[in-house]
Amino acid sequence: MAELSKKRVSSMITREKTGGYLSILVDGGEDEDSWQRRYFVVQKNHFLCYYKEKQDTQLCGPPIDLLFCSIQEVPGEGFCFEIMEGKQVYWLLAESEQELCAWVSSIREAISAAQMAVYNERSALVQSTTMLIKTGWLKKQTAKGWRWNRRWFILQGEHLTYYAKPPTAGKTSQSEEEGDGSSSIKILFAKVKVIPPDAPVKKSHPHSFELLTALRTYRFEAESADEMKSWVNAIDSLTSKLMKTRLRDTLDDRRGFAIKLMSSAKVEKKKDTIPKAVTS
């Protein structure tokens, strides 16, 4: 891993893009968990950093690498949203609906920009695989959530592609001609998630699950509990494998950025600044 220069580290710490106050749920240890008001900044290198006050330079916790994150609002919890970084889930609370929308939009844009930069950087170096992982019928919720459409899905290479009906033999690659009724979802950075059993959608769609991407959360429903588990495991296994094989250098680089940020900004180690460890 190349050594980062002090000048580059300094430019990484410069606060650009979105900045403002949010409350973060922190682990109270033996005491009750609590919300702590902190000043958050979306850095230009797509890290989300937070400080006790706007003028501070000391971080209150490790920077959150938005490259590997997904974000969604938390229904029924006021102006709350969650950021998922691997198995770690951060709960953040905005001060108004307007602030909530602004933060979600800004962070989602940063996630998308970070991932697109990696796609562009790696496209000439990475050869796409056409290995077929899984196929089958799923119901897909429309973007506005009004209805569920039955579609034929193909998990292949780095994409989850769906069709109105199964394609004819020899027409299952991601490079389909336009107009064939197919759409493709990049899954390299996507996160698959089983919807909690107490969620309202589970009453009418008991075998549903979610796929979180930078710009959208997709909802699907399998025909049975076993089939749902099979799809979730297949997608999760493939994304984990892609992360380890396709993004090894990127992972090392981003870890280097985070270490330099923490070293330069001095992470505060007080007990009451530790984010609540909510696992997905």
Image (cartoon, rainbow, N blue to C red):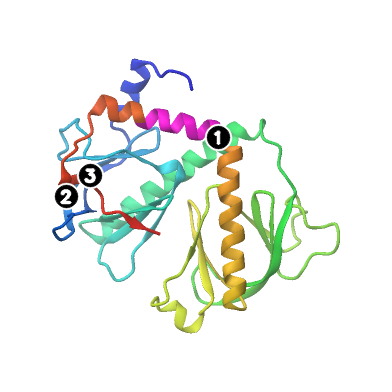
Earlier sequence position, callout 1 versus callout 3: 3
Can I make out residue 127 in this image? yes
Q: CA distance from mark 2 to mark 1?
A: 35 Å
- The spot of residue 181 in percent (x, y) is 72, 64
Q: Is residue 275 left or right of residue 183?
A: left
- The spot of residue 4 in percent (x, y) is 40, 19
Q: Which residues are magenta?
A: 249-258
Residue that numbered label 3 is attached to:
20
Q: CA distance from mark 3 to mark 2?
A: 10 Å
Residue that numbered label 1 is attached to:
248
Snapshot quadrant of residue 232: bottom right
Q: Residue at x 85, y 57 (%)?
A: 170
Q: CA distance from mark 1 to mark 3?
A: 33 Å
Secondary structure beneath dot 3 equals strand
Does the CB distance between marks 3 and 2 fall below 8 Å? Answer: no
Can I make out residue 186 in this image? no
Q: Is residue 10 magenta?
A: no
Q: Residue at x 42, y 49 (%)?
A: 108
Crowding around mark 2 (Cα neighbors within 10 Å: few <14, some 14 to 19, many 20+) is: some
Dominant secondary structure, magenta: helix
- The spot of residue 11 in percent (x, y) is 34, 23
Q: Residue at x 51, y 76 (%)?
A: 146
Please say if 81 is above or below 40. Answer: below
Q: Is residue 256 left or right of residue 175?
A: left
Residue that numbered label 2 is attached to:
37
| Foreground pick, 32 / 134 | 32
Amino acid of disc 3: Gly
Secondary structure beneath dot 2 equals strand
Secondary structure beneath dot 1 equals helix
Amino acid of disc 2: Arg
Q: Residue at x 77, y 68 (%)?
A: 166
